[in-house]
Image (spheres, helix red, strand yellow):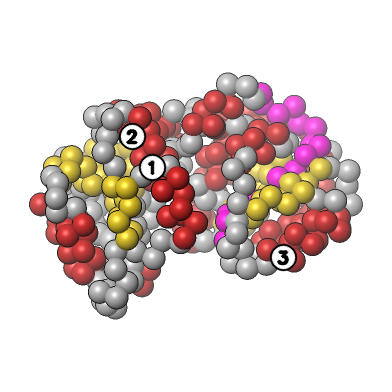
């Protein structure tokens, strides 16, 4: 989604955009088409096994050299100003191989676990060591765009930010969202905590069409008066309307911060741990812990604490709101020369 958000802004500025991907889920390819984006899928049949030392190599569905060659073939009819690459399975070897197709390369990363051959690197997350994470991992000339001021948020977040206020602290509406897939079903865990809490708060639950427990979640929502939203286009509105969120510590953190929504975060993936801890350390959220350390009782306990501590909710909302102004995509677009 962050690439599509950037592409939308660049297209408004007159840029020609082409998306290239392998194994893109159908609902995302449909979204690209609906947005009027050119999309070239890479062949699955031509791909082989990934064979290198990167931690996420298996995610690529091919070797880096195979993927690079397929990308070069897909871009061969044009010399592109920029290639924007967003994939944990790709490093400087892939980037060097595709350089003949473009003038410059921009990498979107948040792992800082591999070498890059790029001209610009974007990491939109907040870390305690934000300014030193990429030392020796990028060329000396590489321009670094670091931190939530560069968060790639959709236009509706920028628009709603002008209308929302810092939360007063009274929790009347709670939003549950752990990402579209939520393979470990932390959505149900949070719902169970809220059921046991037996409060008077309105609860909105957001899941994607790919959630493995979709039918069960919808039924539980019906049974307990929660509102279930499946693959909603109203995410920004739901965040703006809520007083407290329970969710994952990924890129959704910056959407919530932009609209001043206090959140209880669970790190459901390894790359979310440092983000959630750093955000908690400056009072921008409550970090519940890594996924294996969180249960419905721990979620319920903290919600109970916040329900009787409006000043705490207000403080988190104020700090979150100060971190992200919603203009990150404009700053990145400007850096790319558009």
Q: Secondary structure at mark 3?
A: helix
Q: Are marks 2 and 1 in contact (CB under 8 Å)?
A: yes
| Residue corresponding to mark 2 | 11
Direction top: furthest residue: 162
The residue segment tinted magenta is 165-181
Residue 190 percent coordinates (x, y): 73, 57
Q: Tag 1 or tag 3, which sits nearer the N-term?
A: 1
Distance of mark 2 from mark 3, alpha carbons? 38 Å
Residue 226 in view? yes
Q: Residue at x 81, y 37 (%)?
A: 172
Residue 309 percent coordinates (x, y): 80, 36
Residue 93 in view? no
Q: Which mark is residue 215?
A: 3
Query: Can residue 217 be found in the magenta stretch?
Result: no
Residue 59 percent coordinates (x, y): 38, 68
Residue 91 percent coordinates (x, y): 25, 59
| Foreground pick, 123 / 3 | 3
Direction left: furthest residue: 100
Query: Can residue 173 be found in the magenta stretch?
Result: yes
Specify the quadrant of the image occupied by residue 103: top left
Q: Main secondary structure of the magenta part?
A: loop
Left or right: residue 169 versus residue 147 is right
Distance of mark 3 from mark 1, alpha carbons? 32 Å
């Amino acid at each position: 989604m962050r690439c599509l958000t950037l592409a939308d802004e660049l297209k408004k500025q007159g840029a020609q955009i082409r998306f290239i991907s392998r194994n893109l889920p159908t609902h995302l390819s449909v979204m690209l088409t609906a947005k009027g984006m050119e999309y070239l899928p890479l062949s699955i049949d031509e791909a082989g096994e990934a064979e290198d030392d990167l931690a996420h190599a298996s995610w690529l569905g091919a070797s880096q050299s195979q993927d690079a060659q397929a990308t070069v073939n897909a871009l061969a009819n044009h010399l592109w100003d920029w290639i924007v690459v967003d994939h944990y399975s790709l490093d400087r070897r892939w980037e060097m191989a595709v350089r003949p197709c473009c003038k410059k390369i921009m990498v979107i990363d948040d792992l800082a676990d591999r070498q890059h051959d790029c001209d610009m690197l974007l990491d939109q997350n907040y870390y305690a060591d934000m300014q030193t994470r990429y030392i020796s991992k990028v060329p000396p000339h590489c321009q670094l765009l670091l931190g939530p001021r560069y968060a790639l948020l959709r236009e509706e977040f920028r628009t709603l930010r002008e209308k929302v206020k810092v939360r007063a602290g009274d929790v009347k509406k709670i939003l549950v969202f752990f990402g579209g897939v939520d393979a470990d079903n932390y959505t149900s865990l949070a719902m169970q905590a809220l059921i046991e809490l037996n409060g008077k708060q309105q609860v909105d639950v957001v899941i994607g069409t790919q959630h493995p427990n979709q039918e069960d979640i919808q039924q539980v929502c019906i049974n307990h008066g929660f509102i279930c939203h499946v693959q909603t286009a109203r995410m920004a509105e739901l965040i703006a309307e809520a007083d407290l969120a329970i969710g994952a510590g990924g890129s959704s953190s910056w959407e919530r911060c932009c609209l001043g929504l206090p959140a209880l975060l669970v790190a459901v993936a390894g790359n979310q741990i440092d983000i959630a801890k750093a955000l908690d350390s400056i009072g921008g959220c409550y970090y519940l812990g890594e996924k294996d350390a969180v249960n419905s009782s721990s979620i319920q306990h903290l919600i109970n604490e916040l329900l009787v501590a409006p000043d705490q909710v207000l403080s988190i909302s104020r700090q979150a709101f100060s971190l992200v102004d919603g203009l990150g995509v404009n700053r990145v677009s400007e850096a790319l020369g558009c």
